[in-house]
């Protein structure tokens, strides 16, 4: 049993009601649009793989080529599925791969089918994409079998460690070593350029910057390596990657197919931190979350990032607001509470008096507000200054706050944050820190109950009240204008700007997205 | 006295502590290897005060000892700040008096670097280290283009906005990306605008401030730079006071 705050139920209900009101226009907007990446994800689920050997330097995937050519010839407002499966059903192409090759050869002629042809194309598209979703379902069942065989980690929070060498063949032994050293979750950080690439690279890759490219083959290789080490350790080791950036829907589809277990997937992160167009983000985000829901993937949201640009005390309520919005968008897309790794972080300036009590108040607020979500607890970064000794102490307090407030997923903080990419010894020392704190104080939740009306209780109530006040404003003004005005993380992002806007298309009445239809149970 | 040694608890004791990992399993041979390395680092006598194995085939050491090296402070070379530090009021006053319009500042992270922490700390109203960012300066017109801006895009935007200064932060240093990106930036502005290019300022935790000339930019800021230092530099470089010009 963990320590819980008792929040004012009327205030909590009002917060959720407002989050629902703020989210609804954006959900409606998302259902009215499609994007090039959603359409490419449909083709990926139907099994189209590989790259066009002729275009560029041979790195452009077939899914990009097909979607681009369909768009040139007949537009995307009906979706890619109807023209593509009309080509197949009418006998103009032998199958999906043949469609791609005709695109490569410049001989493909797409048309939007009508009447009986439309119905025939629709049935064929649903069958092809349905087969892909069957593979996603099979991967989910396989995960459940492996968890049953090897077991879950012995305790919460799950210990989350990052590897990031840029080379999948270096990442694999590092990830296995991290698992043997105690990591329950391995995240392979992506190459920093990837979020703004409008295609998913292919194959096993060895040349990333500050991270390794997310590719289907890299996913497969790492999952297989972690299956080996899970069997060795008798504990299912989970794998995490990033469904964010311009290819969020496709990466989500690949994660579902290759049995990734967690995905970073925030409703607003791409808008605020990568300057991706807000509409593009919300459309892509909704599709990707439906895939995650279907695949049994736990999402991790990115509220920790706000606190790296904004003050962690003054702006604490923006984290709560974002968590509530992320929850609303996630539930609408079909995710269940156990799949919501809502983010927050230990980023209060350590020179602020009572900083640790404030951290506890914020962490307990999140815990009380989202009782069934496996919260993602992020370590200090902003006040890690290069003083590695002070940083080690701060990480210890971060671990203690995580243990005391019953966090679900603990990203292990490195004392060399902001100094170097973690060394072998940094990771080892960080895990020793976590183990010491969890062994020494993991059970303290039983004894720790902040009194009603005390500092922690009052602070949590203040933050929740500020969050409700901000949600009132957002609901009145609209979420997109609020983002444009810089409500979250200070950055201002208008809805008619940002990267990827040219890949957003308004759907026509007859638009077919077989993946969404199947995932929503409409077909 | 200009010759000094590290200080543990007695003047001249030369005491240092260091830690490192060697790719050998723990044991007496590993400790011997650590002592050999410490000796070659100039630590004599050295003590391995702690060691433990990491995974298979690695050992972590903590070593204490006295270094035999001497440091001559007269031979130390540092980049001293060669401009006066001004308050926000003084910066605004200088711009108003000498420029008669707003000073246009554009900031971005270029290349694949998505870490906007540095540029945000300098530009965001919130600021850094207790100092407000450049957005706070009334006489500055600040645009923060954010992360992963391409160099050609930055050149175009800077030219369109008639930027007086372009600030770029770089955090990712893998394979010297920060140096390569900075040279690309300098080259692109030189090619597009020649002598009329804006003042180019780069910053990041792993930059050496002495490298400005080598990189082709006007100024390099390292770790811990505050918005006030950047603002003061911009005034000094773009709007030198009559006294400074005379000097």
Image: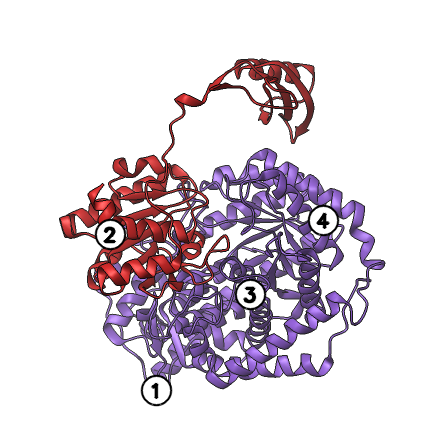
Q: Which of marks 3 and 4 is nearer the N terminus?
A: 4
Q: In this view, does B189 lie to the left or right of A411?
A: left
Q: Where is residue A449 in the image (x, y as percent from the top left)?
A: 82, 63
Say which of A245 and A203 sits in front: A245
Look at mark 1 in the image and give the residue it sits on. A115
Look at mark 4 in the image and give the residue it sits on. A150
Look at mark 3 in the image and give the residue it sits on. A292
Q: Is residue A129 left or right of residue A90?
A: right
Q: What's the mark number on residue B238?
A: 2
Q: How far apart are marks 3 and 4 (CA)?
A: 23 Å
Would you place residue A43 above or below residue B85 in this image? below
The answer to whether any part of residue A434 appears in the image is yes
Disc 4 on helix, strand or loop?
Answer: helix
Chain A painted colour = purple
Chain letter for the residue marked with disc 4 in the picture: A
Q: How far apart are marks 3 and 2 (CA)?
A: 53 Å
Q: Of discs 1 and 4, which sits in the foreground?
A: 4
Q: Which of the 4 image quadrants contains residue A361?
A: bottom right
Q: Where is residue B198 in the image (x, y as percent from the top left)?
A: 22, 53
Say which of A270 and A363 sits in front: A363
Q: Is the C-beta separation of discs 2 and 4 under 8 Å?
A: no
Q: Of discs 2 and 1, which sits in the foreground?
A: 2
Q: How far apart are marks 1 and 4 (CA)?
A: 52 Å
Chain letter for the residue marked with disc 2 in the picture: B
Would you place residue A266 above or below residue B31 in this image? below
Q: Which of the 4 image quadrants contains residue B49?
A: top right
Say which of B148 and B171 sits in front: B171
């Amino acid at each position: 049993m963990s320590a819980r705050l008792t929040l004012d139920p009327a205030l909590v209900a009002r917060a959720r009601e407002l989050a629902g009101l703020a989210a609804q226009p954006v959900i409606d907007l998302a259902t009215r649009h499609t994007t090039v990446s959603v359409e490419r994800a449909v083709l990926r689920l139907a099994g189209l793989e590989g790259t066009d050997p002729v275009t560029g330097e041979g790195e452009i995937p077939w899914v990009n080529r097909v979607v681009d050519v369909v768009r040139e010839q007949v537009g995307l407002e009906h979706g890619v599925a109807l023209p593509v499966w009309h080509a197949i059903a009418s006998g103009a192409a032998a199958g999906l791969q043949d469609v791609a090759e005709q695109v490569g050869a410049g001989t493909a002629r797409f048309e939007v089918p009508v009447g009986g042809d439309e119905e025939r194309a629709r049935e064929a598209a649903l069958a092809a994409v349905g087969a892909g979703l069957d593979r996603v379902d099979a991967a989910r069942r396989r995960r459940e079998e492996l968890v049953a065989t090897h077991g879950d980690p012995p305790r919460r929070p799950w210990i989350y460690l990052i590897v990031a060498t840029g080379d999948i063949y270096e990442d694999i032994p590092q990830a296995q070593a991290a698992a043997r050293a105690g990591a329950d979750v391995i995240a392979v950080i992506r190459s920093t350029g990837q979020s703004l690439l409008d295609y998913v690279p292919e194959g096993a890759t060895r040349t990333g910057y500050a991270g390794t490219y997310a590719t289907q083959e890299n996913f497969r290789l790492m999952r297989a390596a972690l299956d080996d080490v899970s069997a060795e350790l008798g504990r299912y080791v989970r794998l995490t990657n990033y469904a964010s950036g311009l290819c969020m829907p496709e990466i989500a589809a690949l994660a579902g197919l290759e049995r990734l277990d967690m995905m970073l997937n925030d409703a607003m992160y791409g808008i605020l931190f990568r300057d991706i167009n807000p509409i593009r983000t919300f459309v892509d985000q909704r599709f990707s979350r439906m895939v995650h829901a279907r695949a049994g993937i736990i999402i991790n949201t990115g509220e920790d990032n706000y606190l790296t640009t904004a003050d962690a005390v003054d702006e604490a309520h923006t984290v709560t607001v974002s968590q509530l919005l992320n929850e609303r968008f996630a539930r609408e897309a079909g995710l269940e509470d156990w799949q919501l790794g809502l983010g927050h972080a230990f980023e209060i300036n350590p020179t602020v008096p009572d900083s640790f009590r404030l951290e506890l108040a914020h962490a307990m607020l999140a815990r009380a507000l989202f009782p069934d979500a496996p919260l993602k607890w992020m370590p200090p970064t902003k006040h890690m200054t290069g003083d590695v000794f002070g940083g080690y102490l701060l990480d210890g307090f971060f671990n203690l706050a995580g243990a005391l407030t019953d966090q679900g997923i603990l990203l292990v903080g490195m004392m060399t944050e902001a100094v170097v990419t973690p060394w072998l010894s940094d990771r080892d020392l960080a895990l020793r820190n976590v183990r010491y704190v969890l062994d020494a104080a993991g059970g303290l939740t039983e004894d720790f109950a902040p009194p009603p009306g005390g500092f922690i209780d009052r602070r949590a109530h203040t933050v929740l009240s500020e969050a409700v006040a901000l949600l009132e404003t957002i609901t009145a003004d609209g979420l997109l204008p609020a983002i444009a005005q810089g409500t979250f993380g200070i950055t201002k992002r208008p809805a008619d700007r940002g990267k990827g806007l040219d890949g957003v298309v308004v759907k026509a009445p007859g638009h077919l997205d077989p993946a969404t239809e199947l995932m929503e149970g409409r077909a | 006295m200009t010759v000094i040694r590290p200080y543990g608890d007695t003047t001249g004791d030369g005491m240092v502590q260091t830690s490192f990992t060697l790719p050998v399993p723990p044991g007496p041979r590993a400790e011997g290897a650590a002592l050999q390395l410490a000796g070659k680092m100039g630590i004599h006598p050295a003590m391995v005060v702690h060691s433990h194995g990491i995974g298979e085939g690695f050992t972590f050491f903590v070593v204490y000892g006295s270094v035999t090296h001497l440091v001559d402070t007269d031979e130390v070379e540092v980049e001293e700040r060669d401009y006066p530090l001004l308050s926000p009021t003084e910066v605004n006053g200088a711009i108003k008096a000498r420029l008669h319009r707003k000073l246009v500042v554009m900031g971005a992270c270029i290349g694949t670097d998505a870490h906007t922490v540095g540029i945000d700390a300098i530009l965001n109203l919130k600021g850094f280290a207790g100092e407000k960012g450049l957005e706070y300066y009334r006489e500055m017109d600040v645009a923060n283009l954010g992360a992963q801006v391409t160099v050609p895009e930055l050149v175009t935007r800077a030219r369109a906005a008639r930027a007086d200064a372009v600030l770029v932060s770089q955090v990712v240093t893998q394979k010297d990306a920060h140096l390569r990106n900075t040279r690309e930036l300098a080259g692109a502005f030189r090619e597009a605008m020649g002598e009329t290019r804006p003042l180019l300022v780069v910053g990041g935790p792993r930059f050496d401030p002495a490298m400005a000339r080598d990189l082709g930019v006007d100024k390099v800021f390292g770790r811990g730079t505050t918005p006030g230092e950047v603002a003061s530099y911009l005034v000094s470089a773009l709007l030198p006071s009559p006294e400074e010009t005379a000097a």
